[in-house]
Amino acid sequence: MVDVILGLQWGDEGKGKIVDFFAKNYDVIARFQGGPNAGHTLYVGDKKIVLHQIPSGIFHEDKTNLIGSGVVLDAITLKKECDAVASFGVDYKKNLFISERTHLILPTHRALDKASELSKGDGKIGSTLKGIGPAYMDKTGRNGLRVGDLLDKNFTTQYIKLRMKHQRLLDNFNFQEDITSWEEEFFEALDFLRDLKIVNGEYFINEKIAAGNRVLAEGAQGSMLDVDFGTFPYVTSSSTITAGVCSGLGIAPQKIKEVIGITKAYCTRVGSGPFPTELMDETGDFLRNAGNEFGSTTGRPRRCGWIDLIALQFACMINGVTQIVMTKADILDGLDELKVCNSYLINGEEKNYIPFQMNRVKIDPQFKSFEGWKTDISAINNYDTMPAEMKTYIDYLNNFIKVPVKYISNGPGREQIVSV
């Protein structure tokens, strides 16, 4: 049996903490897509750690953690991340596994990412410049190198061949930066990677399922950044939705049971792209500062706005979400009035769907207002004692989306989650 946890907005929904919270109920936690642009923040005791590639179950000693085939892997980032995890006393070599079909991010992928983004001028899509897009392009172009290739005696020859292809592309961009130090660090990290547990990922996970193990598939980024169904072209390069679990781990659709979707109580977005409910005022500043809305991977300030129920309903539909976790509800404690977007006004007509190309139409979001609860909810551990104004807010969301909010996160701590 496989349950899925994924983000329902533009990423940054707080997936790391939620996966960590649910991990105790599972035997295997598996990342199925994305790369080191993910930033899943966890608090272990009073210490903060941000995981970029390692599944968020790594701090549970008895759990198996798998980096699946749908991920693109930066060996340098992984090595640093493993060192950070080890500093918490975790033996990552014991319970971290990597699928041999996982594609590698090369130094030249990073260079291509940077060169491509610079060439776009004002049309930048907001890439994290970590080589993820070019790595996925090589995957679909059938040129990429995979983790299993590291065990082949001809790996260096394969690497040089692909590097030469990339160099020709970089020459076209007139990219002059010296990446020699990147390559030195890369090959050191590959030696580290070879010592980890490299497995045939699809057999590995299906054998676990057949043995009765419970699997939690962990998504990165968010549904509105999906390469097919997100706000294209301002999207990531992978399938961030439930369908990506099947292709990213090699499991059949009928194995999936619960789909747990995560949304903030408001909305944020990093980088460029349409964001209908964005607030360019003091309320937006309040959400950013109170919520510490700065990218855990990039440090970039996040754009903030009211929750968008049209986008949220769309995300629930394409993912088959069965229950919702709402994060950062406590950030709304200080507001007198809350708003939710419940329709779009496009060309004078009220619409309740996501248009084909958001950035080609003028969307005037329509809002419903709610009274704020003006109460510190961070210490509340029972939904019955939550403020009545919050319950009204939650009830409206439940009725609109037709998917129940089952959990509310009311602070960054592991224990700050309330069952509804």
Image (cartoon, rainbow, N blue to C red):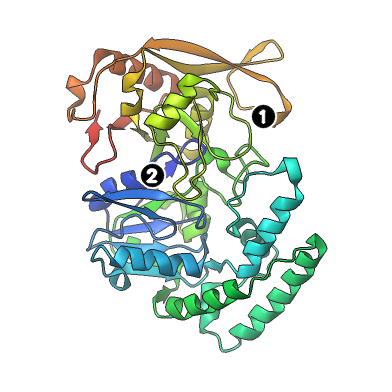
In this rendering, position of residue 76 left or right of residue 390: right
Q: Earlier in the sequence, mark 2 or mark 1?
A: 2
Could you tell me if residue 210 is visible in this image?
no
Q: Give the crowd class for mark 2: few <14, some 14-19, many >=20 residues within 10 Å.
A: many
Residue that mark 2 sits on: 15
In which quadrant of the rendered image does the C terminus lie? Answer: top left
In this rendering, position of residue 217 left or right of residue 159: left
CB within 8 Å, label 2 to label 1: no
Residue 224's spot in the image, x, y percent? 55, 38
Residue 314's spot in the image, x, y percent? 53, 30
Above or below 352: residue 156: below
| Residue drawn at the location 23% of the way across and 52% of the way down | 24
Could you tell me if residue 23 is visible in this image?
yes
Residue 242's spot in the image, x, y percent? 48, 46
Above or below 38: residue 71: below
Above or below 297: residue 93: below
For the residue labelled by badge 2, is the local secondary structure a helix, a strand or a loop? Answer: helix
Residue 357's spot in the image, x, y percent? 69, 32
Above or below 182: residue 43: above
